[in-house]
Every structure is written in structure tokens, then in C-alpha cells.
Amino acid sequence: MVEHYLKRIFALFHRSPNKATFEEYLNYLEEYDDNLVMKLFYYVRDNHTAMPSVAQLKKNLNTLKSRQTFNAARQEHEDCYFCVGVGLVPYLLSPKSDARITRYTQTMQRCKCSAGQEHDQRIPLHQKPQFEIEGDLSYPILVQVKMNKFNRKLNAVTAKAQSGAI
């Protein structure tokens, strides 16, 4: 598999390497698993305009490995309904309760799950849900749907009041 993607990398740049050059690249890349080499191919395809050197491939592989490590660390969080693993829960602000705003809008609060514990402690902690669970919607999507619905009602009332004032 490594040899296949290495050939494709050379083909991308219309290069036909001599055997020694190909073997040098191949010896270096054989240390990595097939999945990472496949990702390297797509990374080279999308980010390079000339055939990368072995040193450039090493740098690219380090970048890809660090992304994998970061993504693996992110996936360690539980699958939380309220924050969907992000650690922040949307909270709907109403123009009825806050005179400073004219439309329904969202702010974020820290979730009680493990992902929420990683956020700044100055962000208010989400205490209880504003809305009951509806269907298969995640809580952030549910809050967005409710906000849109309330804003449409608010727009209709405002338009009705303006047309009556004319």
C-alpha cells in the first residue's frame, strides 16, 4: 500500500524516479502505517506544487500525526446530548427578559460534562435545559430551531404593529 501511494505522489508531479531515489522514499515511508501514508498522499496532492523532498514529507507526516493525536484527544469526551462533546451549551436570550436585545439570540454556557470542564471557569455553568427533548434533534440544534421560530413570531408581530401604525 505504501508503494502504491508513493507511486501516486511521483505521478502527481510527472516524475519517474530512478530506482535508488524511489527506494530512499520507500524506506522512509515504510515506517508508517498505510492509513497515515494515504493521508500523506492527499495532503501532498492538496498542498504541494512541486515534488516534496524526504524532509518535507517528514514535516508533513509530523503535521498529520499531530492532527491525529489532537482528534483522538477530542474524541475522548463522552457523547453529551447538551453540548455534543464540545463542552459549550447554547442558551437562548429573550428580548422579554433583557431590554438590551431586540431579537432572540444565543449565548454559550459551560456544560457539566467532562468537555465543559476544560473551558474557562468564568463561562457560566449550564444549570438546566430551557427546552424539553423533541425528536432526534441534538440540544444545540433544538435551541437554534426554537430561536428561529421565536424570531419569526417576533418579526410577524413587529410587521403587524408597523402596518397598523401607518
Image: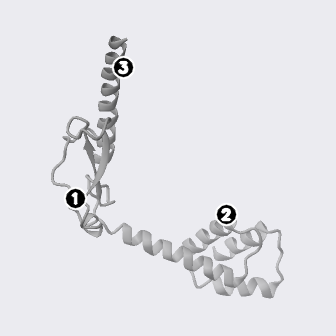
Which label belongs to residue 124?
1
Along the viewing direction, whichever of 143 and 98 lies nearer the viewer: 98
Amino acid under disc 2: Asp
The image quadrant that residue 126 belongs to is: bottom left
Who comes first in sequence, dot 3 or dot 1?
Answer: 1
- Judge by depth and name the residue closer to the eye, 54 or 129: 129
Residue 37 placement (x, y as % from top left): 60, 74
Q: Earlier in the sequence, mark 3 or mark 2?
A: 2
Q: Which mark is residue 46?
A: 2
Please tell me whether mark 3 or mark 2 is closer to you in this view: 3
For this orientation, the residue located farthest to the front is: 166
Quarter of the figure that contains the N terminus: bottom right
How far is disc 3 from disc 2 in space, using C-alphas?
A: 49 Å
Taking the view exactly as shown, the residue that stands out farthest to the left is 128
Residue at image mark 3 = 159
Q: SS for tag 3? A: helix
Query: Which residue is rendered at x = 28% and y = 47% of the image?
Result: 139
Query: Are the two marked residues, 3 and 2, in contact with CB atoms closer than 8 angstroms?
Result: no
* Residue 163 percent coordinates (x, y): 36, 13
Q: CA distance from mark 2 to mark 1?
A: 41 Å
Q: Secondary structure at mark 1?
A: loop
- Amino acid type at mark 1: Pro
Image-based side of 55 in relation to 22, left or right:
left
